[in-house]
Structures are given as structure tokens and as C-alpha cells.
Image: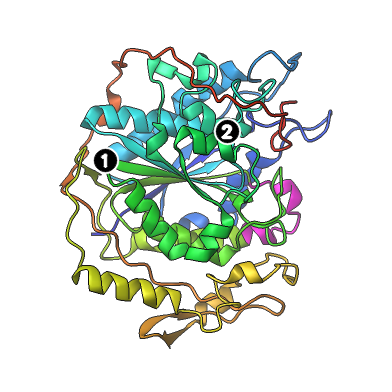
Amino acid sequence: MMRRIAVLDAPTNLGLRPPTSTSVPGCAKAPGALRDHDLLPRLRARDAGCVTPPRYDPGDWRPGDGVCHAREIADYSLALAERIGSIIDRGEFPVVLGGDCSVLLGSALAMHRLGEAVGGRIGLVFVDGHSDFRHPGNASYVGAAAGEDLALVTGRGQADLAALEGRRPYFRDIDVVVLGIRAQDEYRLDLQAAGITTRPVPALRAEGAARTAQWAHEQLADCAGYWVHIDVDVLDPAVMPAVDAPDPGGIAFAELEILLAGLVDTPHCLGVELTVFDPDYDPDGSYAAEIVNTVVAGLAPVTAPEAVPPRLLSARPTPAPRRGGPADRAERSAGVDRLDAGRSGGVNGLGAVDLVGVDSPGGGMADADRDGAVEAEQSGIPGPAYAEPSGVAAVIPVAVEREPVGPPASAGPGLLRRTSPPAQDSSDPNSASESDTDLHKADTA
């Protein structure tokens, strides 16, 4: 049976600093911009409405005051968690359109409630160009929650955000996989010290997007399910400059499409959120169109006729035997490695392409290219081949093998309505290192 997608707007910008002293961040406009490019009808999705955020007003906040808009973000996170919970209660697949990265707090709260209800842990796949791991243990001060969301959802930082309903952490460090950060991310050593698994862009490219998705599944095999967070600044600014903190060294649209398809192509995946696209930097809508193209293609496994509804695994699942045994798995892995002959022009070899040659407005594949795809045979594995616009390296998406999952247990309706919180852990894990405030979503709120 087909998995039905429900699209929920979360147009908050409370977690970002103002672009100028007289303006507010534009990412609150992202859900509307994406809807204008027919995202919902192309996904055949139910419109789950909008969680309207409070007013953006930093007021007299100053560095050292804690996270700016903390009370508003906390209230918004509670409301967002309720709405995400109601979508999952209906057996649907939530796609949350942010907004800035602070929407992760609402998603994380919903996932912790769900994990408590089923007696298991929910994991997080964090796809982001930045680690967003600034917290009082590694920075002189905090302030912009969108640059601190991963720290907050793993229990670091002030309790009014990191311990809503007495739940702390929402995700355990060992249940988080970080993909797409830059090789020299400021907090990469802090992630390593915490035991958070990471795969920066160079490693992601070396292994390929499809195999990276498979690897992420395996890292979270002990979890009952997982949530996917995607910040579009994981993309290189050569193809996606319409974000608040563009950072060179990112991935391409085709890589994101393949990665997303691999992550959602399992009932283990419970939902996806998309954040930080800023339409103020996209006056002609070309970047919004490219994001929609990528999301629609990446979520195709969710709405495929053979797709199964999201399911939760037992707390410690017994791994299912892989089809064909180890030899078959090795053959499939080798086939993925061989998919792009010459490698330098393909997805897995995109590190050899500087991306400076991208000259199309959206920086990716046009609809006509996707619609006119033809089947290509490479290494015995059929897959669609797209004609890339002039100036863009040819990219061949990979058909991702469905990840085997353990014995399922249906979540069932009403599971997220439980409100009895566990005992609060008042400890605040800190890193021993100190660093200056990073430039990403800087603490000027």
C-alpha cells in the first residue's frame, strides 16, 4: 500500500539573527514559495496546514542572555510536536516545511514522545552543512537557536529548550548520524568527543550518496525508527545560495536527491523536515523550483505503489538476513561504485568537480531533463540517466536498495498523546574545548 505524505508548514524564523538591523530573516516565506511550485499536488500529499509562529522580535536581547526568543521557541515547539504527532497517529508520513532549524526542537519532542510510547528510542539523521552544535560548553555565549539545534536536542544548553516536558535529551548522542557537514566544521571535534557519528562531505562523496544512506540505516539499527532533518545549506552555494549562511564545499542537488531517496526508502523512516531556504535570495523562484524537483524525486519511494506505511521496530531488532547473503551485498556495493564510468563526472566522483562551472539559475536538473530520462545500463544495474544542462557535470542517480528492517510493531493511533514525562536529567553535557562564536547563525539573534 502507498504511504501517504502530509505536508505541514512550520514558517518560523525565531531561531535566526536578523539579516540587518531593520529586517527579519526570510526563511519564514519558504513553505509558501515551495507550495507555489506545486509541491503538494506533485507529492499527492494531504495539506496538514500550518503551525503559525509567534512574532519575531529580539527586543533588548544581548549576548549572555541565553537563547534569543527562548520562550517563544519553546511554545512553538510544543505546538509543532502536537501537530507532527497527530500526523503520525493517522499513519501518514510527515513532511515539515521550515522555517529555520529550530523546528527540529518540535520534531525532536514528538519523536521522544513516540519513543516513550513504544518503549524504544528514535534516532536522528541530521543532513546539514553545519553541525549546529554550539552550546555553553564550547562557546562564550549562545543566542541563535538555529545554530544550536543539534546541541539542544541532544540535551546541551538551557533546560527551557533542551528539556521540554522534562525530557532530556530528545535524542541520545549514539542515536544521531550527521551527514554533509564541511570537512573543517568548527565543532567537528566536539561531535567526535560526544560519540556522534558523522560523515562530512568528502567522505559522503567518496562512498556515494546511495551507500551513505545505507550506512546511516546501519548506524541506527538499534533504534525503533528515525527522523530526517535536512538543511538546504548542505548544498554548495554554487547551486544553492539562497540560505542564511552559505558555505563552500557542499553537495549537489543530484546527491541530495539520491541521499533523500535512500533515507526514506524504508518504513524505519518516520518523517522529514526541510529548513533554511530563504526566498528573499530567490527573486525569480528558480531555486525554489529546483528544491521542489529534488524533494519530489527524493520522496518518490514514499509514494511508490509498493511502499509500506511507516513502522516502528522493536527496541533491539534482530537484523533480517540480507537477500542473497554477503556475496550478493558485495556485488551490489561494487555495482554502485562502478555506476559512473570515469567517475569524475558522476555523483560519487563529484568531489573532482569544483561546481564553479554550474551556470544554470537553479543549479540542477530541469523538469524536462527528468521527464526525458532514459534507462541506462552500467555495470548491469539499470538506472535513469539525465541530460544535465550546459556547464553541469552529468549525474546519474542510483536506484537505492530497500533497507531490510527488523520485526515491525505498528505505532497505532494515539501514541503521541501520552504526556507523562520521564524523570528529568538535570546534567548538561559539556565539551572541554572552548571556541569563538561561529559565523553560522551567529549569536546576534
Q: Which mark is residue 133?
A: 2
The amino acid pointed to by label 2 is: Phe
Q: Which mark is residue 224?
A: 1
- 321 is higher (above) or lower (below) than 276: below
Residue 110: which quarter of the image? top left
Residue 343: which quarter of the image? bottom right
The amino acid pointed to by label 1 is: Ala
Q: Is residue 346 left or right of residue 245?
A: left
- Magenta span has 168? no
Q: Is residue 343 left or right of residue 107?
A: right
- 159 is higher (above) or lower (below) than 130: above
Q: Is disc 2 placed on a helix, strand or loop? A: loop
What percent of the width, then of the height, locates residue 409?
17, 42
**Residue extent of the magenta highlight:** 277-289
Residue visible at 36% across and 39% down? Answer: 123
Residue 144 vs residue 379, the one in the foreground: 379
